[in-house]
Image: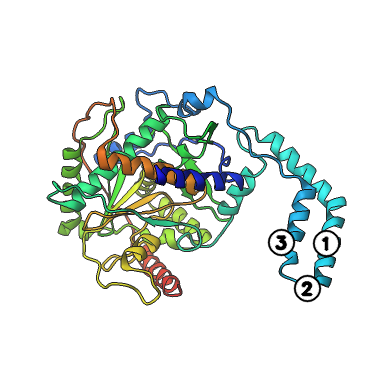
Amino acid sequence: RERKREREREIDKMMRVGLGRLGTWTYRRATANIWAAQESQLLCRWSSSVGSEEVSEAAIVSEAVEAREVPRLPMPDLKNTCNEYVKQISVLVDKDDAERVSQLAMSFCDGEGRDLHEELERLDKENSGGSWLSGFWESMYLNDRNPLPINTNPFFILENIVHESDRHPQLSSSARLIRSTAKFHHRMRTGQMPQEMQGDLPLCSRQLPRLLASARVPGSVRDTYESYPDSNHVVVCLNGFFFAFQVLDSDGNLISQVDCEKVIQKCIKMAMDENVMMEGSVPNNFTALDRSTWAELRSEITASSPLNEGILTTIDRAIAVFHVVVEDVQGGAMEDELSEEQKLDLLGQHALTPDNGWFDKLQFFVHQDGRYGVNMEHTAVDGHSLLSFLKYMIDDVKVGVPTEAGVMERPKPVGLYFQLDEKFQEIFKRAAETSTESRHSV
């Protein structure tokens, strides 16, 4: 109960500074890619098929939200804002400068500030699904050209939730994490999630549907953020290679724990196969570059092969990316006070595959002892939304959240092997060097 109260106080604090009413939905469907290979056609079907469920924005919002109106983010008063600004500045400067700041603030309030405030009021009226702040929020992230690691993406190390009966903690933990994430995704898109409350006040849930099955797609000047509520598959990364498999069928039936573990085992065997090692590796570190450079490279990779385009679409549309760290991470605490675990989750690296993260979407890291780490792309959601999801996931992993869904047939994992010629391999090496230099600067 005390932990619940602490969490409620955190949410209340964030709500009071305006972090609980942000975000609008703009779901865009990706164009299906025609792949020559049979496995590619399978992934394309995952990427483009909605299935028997009718998924809509209205369905994603729970009945409780529709029944009780969530208060909008209030429009701040211009005069109060200026007074608060003067109050904050006055403790940092001497008396004369404080007086000058006060005069400038009042002049702004009576002049240019009025025009700008009217513009905010216009934006507030136009954005019926969000608030006056929504557009600024997304632009703050999508226009930023800096690399996502360190600059934007936060990370968390989660508590160790390993069951005593687990013979292989990493394998079992990975499967539980995948299943819990898929459960949350399905319950959210079908309107089964209960409304979160702060006392008698319903909390805004608009950000939650954009946490999973979403991706930030790089652009030369501005990125875009795409959401795919009909997604039924996940992507697993092992030793730098990506694999995709279905975790929900068209009727909402979920992969079983046993089948999920066996599919992950199959992926591990595929990743260790000598023929796989000869394939073009996944350009993970490209997502860690500055956004304009990554946008240019992604366009070139896409144009070079329809297979590459389909793979990128499959990763974008995945519910989430799950990194199963196969090799031991060497070393202990870092001199800069970042442990190897923290460095992995923050920067997406470990000993043998130094650029192992796909930073354009929500990604998890499962260590050999079964502990979790999560790295979040920040555009569409803020901390309280991620905490809501993580609470659900942790509760489900610990004791299991009841679900009426049945069990789907065991899926077949598909390797996502890019076709990259020597030109891209050279670019890949330079990108790795650039990414390494950036990490070492921390």
Distance between mark 3 and mark 2 Cα atoms? 12 Å
Residue matched to label 2: 94
Name the N-terminal-most of marks 2 and 1: 2
Q: Is residue 127 above or below residue 360?
A: above
Residue highlighted by disc 1: 102
Q: Residues within 10 Å of mark 1 (few under 14, many from 20)?
A: some
Q: How is the image coloured?
A: rainbow
Q: Amino acid at mark 1?
A: Ser
Q: Which residue is mark 3?
A: 88
**Hey, what amino acid is under mark 3?**
Gln
Contact? badges 3 and 2 (CB < 8 Å): no
Q: Secondary structure at mark 1?
A: helix
Q: Position of residue 219 (x, y in %)?
A: 53, 53
Question: Picture quarter containing residue 442?
Answer: bottom left
User: In this picture, is 47 found above or below 224?
Assistant: above
| Residue 359 sits in quarter | bottom left
Q: Is residue 149 left or right of residue 39?
A: right
Q: Nearer the viewer, mark 2 or mark 1?
A: 2
Residue at the extreme front of the image, as rendered: 2
